Image: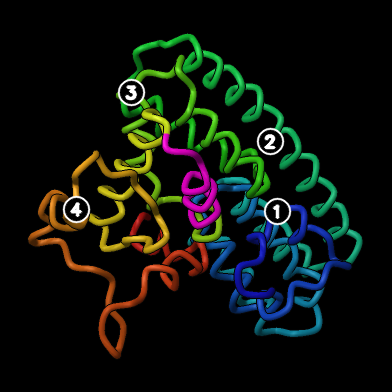
Amino acid sequence: MEPGADPVRTDDVMDPSRELGAIDTPLVLAVMAAKDPFEGMSLAASVRMMPNAREEMIVGAIVGIVGEVSKHEIVQETCDTAMREEFNPRIVTTLRHKAIDHISNVRQIALTDLVERVRLLSESRVVDEEFVDEVFNLAFSCDLRTDTFRDMLVKILLSNKVRARVKLLVIDRLHLLPMQLRLELVTKINALGDATDSAFIKREIEFTLKERGLIPPTLHVPRRPGQSQKLSAILPSSKGIQPPSGPSGPVPWHEVLLRDKYANYATAS
């Protein structure tokens, strides 16, 4: 995939005719199958490996390991069945069709729940952190396209019917988004005018990214008349919070934003 491309989606992985480039290797698929926190992608990655497992013993062994370490019951059962049937092509095809149906059902249920929760937010309901976390989880479970997910978050952040406290909870979770999605969200927010509401959102995003060691240089926050000092001089202190570092020192914020989404979950499970 090209740098900055839309993150790979479950449908892409489930389609055997779809070219996935470097992702389409047993080792990468195994990591996706074993570590992805959402069962749809985990299931899709495990099923994609199976056609080659009959001829390549190492791939078959990897599928077996995935079945043992995955936290998703459906993935465990699918891998166990494939192993037990020695990756019989007919069985693998059946498992693939069952996986497609399962993913579709899970996605539809998640979408229904997501729409209901967003509706509650638009009614100025007071919600807690767990509620906002579930909105994010449902959006990931729906496997929303990057532009759809981005536009949903922008509408929540700019709606005058959503409470300010809820908006802050959303902003506080931006670091959990896939890198390309976060970059597009920041870019779209940055393109807004300097109205009071959008200025508040921009300022809070900048505060949050600073605390995470990610300060987008393009984020423009309007200044009050006569305010000449740099915004960085009046931002809350980030003492004790270290920016991401690489072998040659701090990693530029845009490189962090464009990393694969799995970096977000490296220590989550």
Dot 2 corresponds to which residue? 107
Tell whether label 2 touches label 3 (CB within 8 Å).
Answer: no
Dot 1 amino acid type:
Thr
N-terminal of the pair, mark 1 or mark 3, is: 1
Dot 2 amino acid type:
Arg
Dot 4 amino acid type:
Ser
| Residue 70 visible in the current orientation | no
Q: Is the residue marked by circle 2 packed among few (<14), some (14-19), or many (20+) residues within 10 Å?
A: many
Residue drawn at (36%, 55%) of the image: 268
Query: Image check: 210 left or right of 219?
Result: left
Query: Image check: 256 left or right of 234?
Result: right
Dot 1 corresponds to which residue? 10
Tell me where residue 35 appears, x and y as whole percent: 49, 61
Magenta span dominant secondary structure: helix
Q: Is the residue marked by circle 1 packed among few (<14), some (14-19), or many (20+) residues within 10 Å?
A: many
Asked where in the image residue 47 lies, by quadrant, the reply is bottom right
In three-dimensional space, the C-alpha distance between marks 4 and 1, rounded to whole angstroms, equals 48 Å
